[in-house]
Image (cartoon, grey):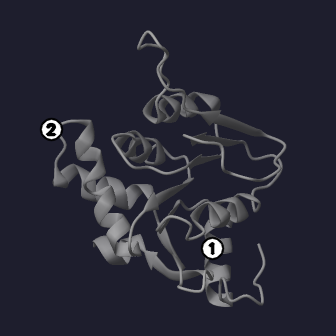
């Protein structure tokens, strides 16, 4: 990952993101549709060493990298009989059995957020994309999405779980001219403590 003339990312942001990848930190990548979330995710994943196993879980294959030890999984809708569905929740749970060095989850938007938080709190660093209007709004969304998994989930559980899962939030923005850039990096410990 390199800085560029387009102003997509500044040098300080670049160095912080590279350090996060080298240190095995988990990064939440937020932004609106077409803001560059998956592009940033793919660029960060290119920082992985060849001997690090990547496991990715997506609804639609969008991650675009070449990596020698990559297990790419995709959801499957239910068939005509209403069975055989493979959900993002199922994929996240199965990913843990594949001994990933890094877990990448595309577009968390439902109950799978709980499984992702549990997975990332098991010692596996990860990257994830989420729709949000700012870095802090992305964290707020992560404090509510797991509630879709069941009524017995409390704020007392979620807050430390989110803090344990992610160290950094990158917020991607697309301006009126269509220019995409990393607008904000937020340290999770600063935002939720």
Q: Position of residue 86 (x, y in %)?
A: 50, 24
**Residue 3: image x %, image y %?**
75, 84
Residue 164 image point, x, y percent: 39, 57
Kindly identify which residue carries mark 1.
Answer: 17
Spatial CA distance of label 1 from label 2 is 35 Å
Q: Secondary structure at mark 2?
A: loop
| Quadrant (top left, top right, bottom left, bottom right) of the C terminus | bottom left
Displayed quadrant of residue 150:
top left
Q: Which quadrant, please, contains the N terminus?
A: bottom right
Q: Is residue 170 above or below residue 183?
A: above
- For the residue pair 131 and 145, the one nearer the viewer reads as 131
Q: Does residue 63 appear left or right of residue 158 in this picture?
A: right
Camera-near label (1 vs 2) is: 2
- Label 1 neighbourhood size at 10 Å, few (<14), some (14-19), many (20+)? many
Q: Is residue 33 above or below residue 55?
A: below
- Left or right of 168? Residue 67 is right
Instruction: Name which of mark 1 and mark 2 comes first in the sequence.
Output: 1
* Residue at image coords 77%, 60%: 46
Q: Are marks 1 and 2 in contact (CB under 8 Å)?
A: no
Q: Which residue is mark 2?
A: 151
Q: For the image shown, how many numbered marks are present on the structure?
A: 2
**In the displayed structure, does residue 34 sit left or right of residue 143?**
right
Local crowd size for mark 2, using a 10 Å CA cut-off: few (<14), some (14–19), many (≥20): few
- On screen, 99 above or below 15? above
Q: Residue at x 54, y 40 (%)?
A: 59
Tag 1, which secondary structure?
helix
Q: Residue at x 78, y 53 (%)?
A: 65
Going 25% across and 54% down the picture, which residue do you hit? 144
For this rendering, which residue is in front, 70 or 180? 180
Residue 34's disc is: none
């Amino acid at each position: 990952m390199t800085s560029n003339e387009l102003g997509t990312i500044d040098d300080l942001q670049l160095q912080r993101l590279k350090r996060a990848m080298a240190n095995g930190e988990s990064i939440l990548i937020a932004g609106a549709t077409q803001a560059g979330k998956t592009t940033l995710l793919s660029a960060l994943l290119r920082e992985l060493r060849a001997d690090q196993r990547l496991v990715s879980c997506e609804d639609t294959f969008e991650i675009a990298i070449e990596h020698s030890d990559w297990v790419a999984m995709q959801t499957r809708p239910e068939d005509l009989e209403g069975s055989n569905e493979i959900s993002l929740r199922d994929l996240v749970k199965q990913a843990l059995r594949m001994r990933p060095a890094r877990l990448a989850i595309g577009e968390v938007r439902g109950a799978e957020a709980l499984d992702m938080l549990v997975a990332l709190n098991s010692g596996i660093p990860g990257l994830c994309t989420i729709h949000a209007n700012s870095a802090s709004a992305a964290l707020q969304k992560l404090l509510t999405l797991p509630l879709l998994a069941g009524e017995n989930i409390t704020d007392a559980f979620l807050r430390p779980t989110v803090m344990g899962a992610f160290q950094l939030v990158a917020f991607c923005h697309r301006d009126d001219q269509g220019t995409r850039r990393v607008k904000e990096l937020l340290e999770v410990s600063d935002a939720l403590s």
